[in-house]
Amino acid sequence: MDNAGSTALAVVLVVLIIFVIIVLVRSVRIVPQARAGVVERLGKYQRTLNPGLTILIPFVDRLLPLLDLREQVVSFPPQPVITEDNLVVSIDTVVYFQVTDARAATYEIANYIQAVEQLTTTTLRNVVGGLNLEEALTSRDQINGQLRGVLDEATGRWGIRVSRVELKAIDPPHSIQDSMEKQMRAERDRRAAILTAEGTKQSAILTAEGQRQAAILKAEGEAKAAILKADGESQAIQKVFDAIHKGNPDQKLLAYQYLQTLPKLAEGTSNKLWIIPSEVGEALKGIGSALGGTNPDPAAPGGLFDETAAKTSGP
């Protein structure tokens, strides 16, 4: 009898311990960071649990599955959309959203991810349906903005905030893609031809400008060289002139100096006729008399002048 009572007591204790463990497990809950939980008491909303440790009433309170409060990214499969010019394009969409109200996300909508997907599809068809293909391909920012505005307004009552909507790809029909590729190739060829022509034009302009500058610099250099040469010759002549006049020369010395310059005058190709002043001729007569000891013929006034002129004049 004692053994039976001891066994029954042991069973009761074991059952009691198990019951206590179950109660503790159901009473103590830990909510992780960036999570939120909705508590129902006897089937009715009671409160929303924030991150941390919380105590529930066993068998009375029920904790629903935790909701993720972080920003979520959902990529939807490509959707066929008809444009204003009756072309079917395939659009791939990505939606960024975040749960801001756990209660509304639990009770206002059954499946908020599916609801966001369907709402995105219908809104996308409405927006792109008012655009032609070219506008749809070039107005991604405008489409993204309109989608975000409509989705954010519609999902606000669900406790969801849509932060961004992106169009991953807009794929037109294959026939349109081939035409667009040909058009783009022709446009690239045209731009390349324009750039080549512009480059050739600029090169020709720069070459001509360089030649012009070189010709100007060459002419300026030659002009400066001629000026310097003329200045040098002028100074040399001036020095010779000053030296001669300082020595108080007579006509015989001047005639002798003139004779010394005749070979230099003969070096020019255009010297055909020399003009000798009469004073020089008279001086040459005196030089001839002094060297030869003979008097010139009075009947020949030219005398030595005429003979010298005959020898030195050109043909």
Image (cartoon, rainbow, N blue to C red):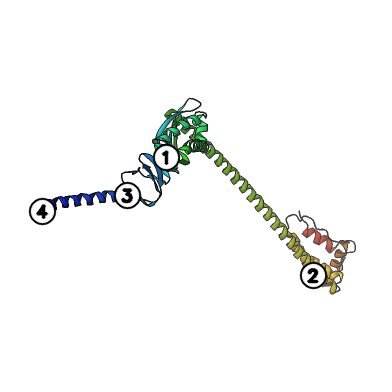
In screen coordinates, is 155 left or right of 278? Answer: left
User: Looking at the image, is mark 4 or mark 2 nearer the viewer?
Assistant: 4
Q: Are marks 1 and 3 in contact (CB under 8 Å)?
A: no
In screen coordinates, is 166 left or right of 66? Answer: right
* Residue behind mark 1: 105
* Residue behind mark 4: 2
Label 4 sits on a secondary structure element that is helix
In the rendered image of this protein, does residue 59 appear above or below residue 117?
Answer: below
Residue sticking out furthest to the front: 1
Label 1 sits on a secondary structure element that is helix
* Residue behind mark 3: 27
Circle 1: residue type:
Ala
* Residue behind mark 2: 239
**Residue found 36% across the figure and 39% down from its top:** 43
Circle 2: residue type:
Lys
* First reached walking from the N terminus: tag 2 or tag 1: 1
* First reached walking from the N terminus: tag 1 or tag 3: 3
User: Looking at the image, is mark 2 or mark 3 nearer the viewer?
Assistant: 3
**Residue found 19% across the figure and 50% down from its top:** 12
* First reached walking from the N terminus: tag 2 or tag 3: 3
In the image shown, does 109 or 173 lie closer to the viewer?
A: 109
**Residue found 24% across the figure and 49% down from its top:** 19
Circle 4: residue type:
Asp
Tell me where residue 173 appears, x and y as whole percent.
43, 29
In the rendered image of this protein, does residue 225 appear above or below residue 246?
Answer: above
